[in-house]
Image (cartoon, rainbow, N blue to C red):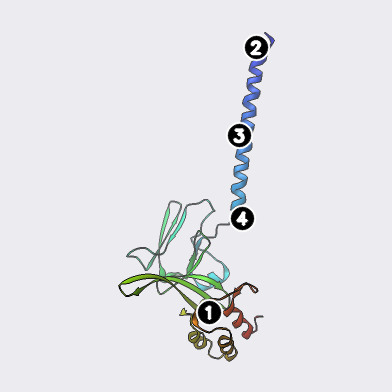
Amino acid sequence: MAWLLLYPRLHQISIMKHFISYFLFLCIILTGMIARGQQYPAVAGIYLSAEDYRNGTLTYRQADPLQKYKIRADQPGKQSKVKVIRGDETINLDKSSLYGFRDGKNRLYRVFNKSNFRILSSDSLMLYSREETVANGKERLRKTNYYFSDGPDGRLVKLTMDNLKQVYRQNRAFHDLLDMHFSSDRDLMRYDKLYSQYKVEYLLDKTIGNL
């Protein structure tokens, strides 16, 4: 008889234990979400100018890491447009009105002549890559080409030794180092693990007093 009287109380305790367990589980999930948000801040957005890029100023940015966010910069038939999908909002921009963007995977791009170039390095010498289609007989192949500019707002030029010497034509010491360290244009993307930068960047910095 005493057990029957205790049963409702035991049942309440059981329900309370389940509730506490569920509450703790939710706390763990929310803590993980907050930690991820702190570890991976909302960085996707649009750079309207080279100055914005220098200062890290993003427009039409992602509000938080969990917000639905996409940048569509290669739309079929709309190569001059960029579409930003932010939550339930859709924003259409002319490529001529912006400098570049940072996508949801933390990749940086510069827009130049309506084309998107991935930024590989943001030193004194800006380096870029772009996947392009090239003709090989009757075949059309995808090839990665490399470009550079003198600073964030410099004109993009294909990465070759001759072009580097032309852009930095007054820097004879840089010319000599290029001839000393590289035997062909293909070597220019050599990465120096010791200095954690591309070799060509290091050589330019060495001649302009950045080291």
Which disc, if any, is residue 54?
none
Residue depth check, mark 1 versus mark 3: number of the one nearer the observer? 1
Helix, strand or loop at disc 4?
A: helix
Judging depth in this view, the residue of 184 and 207 nearest the camera is 184
What is the CA distance from the residue labelled 1 to the residue labelled 3? 57 Å
Please give the residue where the numbered disc 4 appears in the rendered image: 39
Residues at marks 4 and 1, CA–CA distance in whole angstroms: 34 Å
Query: Which residue in the protein does label 1 denote?
Result: 188
Whole-Å distance between the Cαs marked 2 and 1? 84 Å
Q: Which residue is drawn at 65% across and 84% down?
A: 209
Q: Residues within 10 Å of mark 1 (few under 14, many from 20)?
A: some
Q: Which amino acid does label 3 sit on?
A: Tyr
Q: Quadrant of residue 122?
A: bottom right
Of the two numbered discs 2 and 1 in the rendering, the one whose residue sits closer to the viewer: 1
Where residue 101 appears, as percent x and y from the top left, is 48, 66
Say if mark 2 contacts mark 1, CB within 8 Å. no
Answer yes or no: do the residues labelled 3 and 4 have beta carbons within 8 Å? no
Drawn side of residue 29 relative to residue 158, left or right: right
Q: Is the C-beta separation of discs 4 and 1 under 8 Å?
A: no
Residue 47 visible somewhere in the drawing: no
Residue extending furthest toward the left: 138
Q: Which of marks 4 and 1 is nearer the N terminus?
A: 4
Q: Which of marks 2 and 1 is nearer the N terminus?
A: 2
Determine the image quadrant of residue 43: bottom right
Label 4 or label 1, whichever lies nearer to me, is 1
Residue 22: assigned label: 3
Disc 2 to disc 3, C-alpha distance: 28 Å
Of marks 2 and 4, which one's residue comes earlier in the chain?
2
Closest to the observer, 143 or 127: 143
